[in-house]
């Protein structure tokens, strides 16, 4: 879960399971949400397969 506090300033894309935005926060970009989140560091799909099995 990504929680953007009122003083948060985000410029870019977000990939998260859930998003909470307080009044006053600023977000410019794209947001992809869902239970499947890939490993952004390695770009592999192994976490997607694991999430499918546990869902």
Image: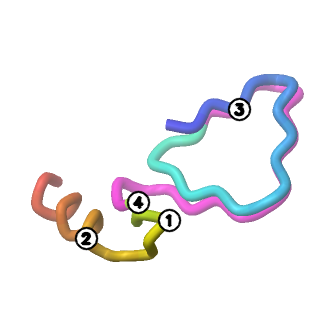
Q: Which mark is residue 41?
A: 1
Q: Mark 1 or mark 4, which is nearer to you? A: 1
Q: Mark 2 or mark 4, which is nearer to you? A: 2
- Quarter of the image for residue 25 reads top right
Q: Which residues are magenta?
A: 20-36
Q: Is residue 16 left or right of residue 12?
A: left
Q: Is residue 30 left or right of residue 6?
A: left
Q: Position of residue 39 (x, y in %)?
A: 42, 63
Q: Do callouts 1 and 2 mark residues in contact (Cβ within 8 Å)? A: no
Q: Which mark is residue 46?
A: 2
- Labels 1 and 2: the sequence-earlier one: 1
Residue, disc 4: 37
Q: Badge 2, how many Cα within 10 Å: few under 14, some, many 20+?
A: few
- Labels 2 and 4: the sequence-earlier one: 4
Please tell me whether mark 3 sits on a helix, a strand or a loop.
strand
Q: Residue furthest bottom?
A: 44
Report, in whole angstroms, how far the alpha carbon at label 1 lies from the one at label 2. Answer: 12 Å
Q: Position of residue 55 (x, y in %)?
A: 17, 54
Q: Do callouts 3 and 1 mark residues in contact (Cβ within 8 Å)? A: no
Residue drawn 42% across the image and 56% down it: 34
Residue, disc 3: 4
- Labels 3 and 1: the sequence-earlier one: 3
Q: Badge 3, how many Cα within 10 Å: few under 14, some, many 20+?
A: some
Please tell me whether mark 2 sits on a helix, a strand or a loop.
helix
Q: Nearer the viewer, residue 45 or 2?
A: 45
Please tell me whether mark 4 sits on a helix, a strand or a loop.
loop
Q: Position of residue 31 (x, y in %)?
A: 64, 59
Report, in whole angstroms, how far the alpha carbon at label 1 lies from the one at label 4. Answer: 12 Å
Q: Mark 3 or mark 1, which is nearer to you? A: 1
């Amino acid at each position: 879960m990504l929680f953007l506090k009122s003083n948060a300033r985000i410029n870019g894309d977000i990939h998260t399971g859930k998003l909470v935005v307080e009044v006053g926060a600023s977000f410019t970009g794209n947001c992809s949400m869902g239970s499947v989140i890939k490993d952004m560091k390695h770009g592999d799909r192994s976490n997607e397969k694991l999430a499918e099995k546990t869902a």
